[in-house]
Amino acid sequence: MQPFSIAGVQMRVSAAAPNVAAMLLKLDILMNIYPWVDMVVFSELCAYGPLTYHAQPVPGEFEQQMCAAAAKHGVWLLPGSVFERRDGLIFNTASVINPSGTVVTRYRKMFPFYPYEVGVTPGSEYCVFPVPGVGTFGVSICYDMWFPETSRTLAVMGAEVILHPTLTGTIDRDIELSIAQATAATNQCFFFDVNGLDSGGSGRSIVCGPDGRVLYQAQHNEEFFPIEIDIERVRRSRELGVLRLGQPLKSFRDHASAFSIYQPGLRHPYLDSLGPLIKPSRLQELTELQIREQAGHAFTGPASPELPTDFDPSIGQPLG
């Protein structure tokens, strides 16, 4: 066994003021209590909150502060992510820093939470990096995990641990917890999902092992959760199967060419029929949009006068 310890930091995040000083304090306290920890992971957009107004250049002052903190404590550090302003675009970017205080890689979120994460450009490169003497790690951010192709690609690239800073404060958190377990099991890897609090999410961070079982789940309070993992569990699972049963990565390898839906330039009529990627609106407005689309017209104006404001299309008559 080659033990390696990863600590998640679930902390309150403000959207009104920077959280950098609080992050540094949390790191100092964590390393005082758990000096044996090898890696620390914060939540998505922890440093400045979820507003693109706070976008900044990367590298920049924040990354420099985190590099100094990593070197001070001699730990690997993934300080969540920040909105990065680069070449007139905004990305959601996570930096990976080694114990010497050097940035070894950066990851730009591939699937911004459209149509809500307005103005954020998707990244285009997957992120894996070696931890010498331990194993291969991958990084994804929040909504990325809703697309199994992202996690599968990291696994195919050799990732044995996926680090997943997230910011979820919505009612779909239960769904995400199940996705985290499924991601760990189907990719036979450790999965560290670190959520924030307040403007940074609703907590309930989760850590899963390569059999999909929950190693730890946080609640709705600030906390540190240091977990010692054994990478050999991943390698045994990938060699012999999940619980000595299914071997999904080997099966994927043997049939990877069978997925015709991924052919470049191929059109998907059913997906095209689903309509535009927009925020859901009131039922009346959605119904009108569907009617206009079916009639071949673009929806460009306010509610149609043909539909009274108290009309309920589900019952076909005005409400009363």
Image (tube, rainbow, N blue to C red):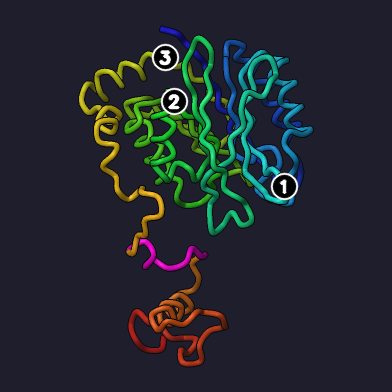
Judged from this view, the residue extending furthest toward the bottom is 306
Question: Which one is earlier in the sequence, the residue at label 1 or at label 3?
Answer: 1
Judged from this view, the residue extending furthest toward the left is 245
Q: Residue at x 40, y 54 (%)?
A: 265
* Magenta-highlighted residues: 270-278
Q: Alpha-carbon distance for marks 1 and 3?
A: 41 Å
Q: Which residue is mark 2?
A: 159
Q: Quadrant of the N terminus?
A: top left
Q: Nearer the viewer, mark 2 or mark 3?
A: 2
Q: Which residue is mark 3?
A: 230
Tell me where residue 293 appears, x and y as whole percent. 42, 78
Judged from this view, the residue extending furthest toward the top is 1
Q: Nearer the viewer, mark 2 or mark 1?
A: 1
Q: Which residue is mark 1?
A: 87
Task: Give the left or right position of residue 244, taking residue 3 as reference.
Answer: left
Q: In front: 290, or 271?
A: 271
Task: Give the left or right position of residue 222, taking residue 159 as reference.
Answer: right
Q: Nearer the viewer, mark 1 or mark 3?
A: 1
Q: Alpha-carbon distance for marks 2 and 3?
A: 14 Å
Question: SS class of the residue under badge 2?
Answer: loop
Marker disc for residue 113: none
Q: Is residue 320 visible?
A: no
Q: Residues within 10 Å of mark 3 (few under 14, many from 20)?
A: some
Question: Which one is earlier in the sequence, the residue at label 2 or at label 3?
Answer: 2
Q: Residue at x 45, y 75 (%)?
A: 286
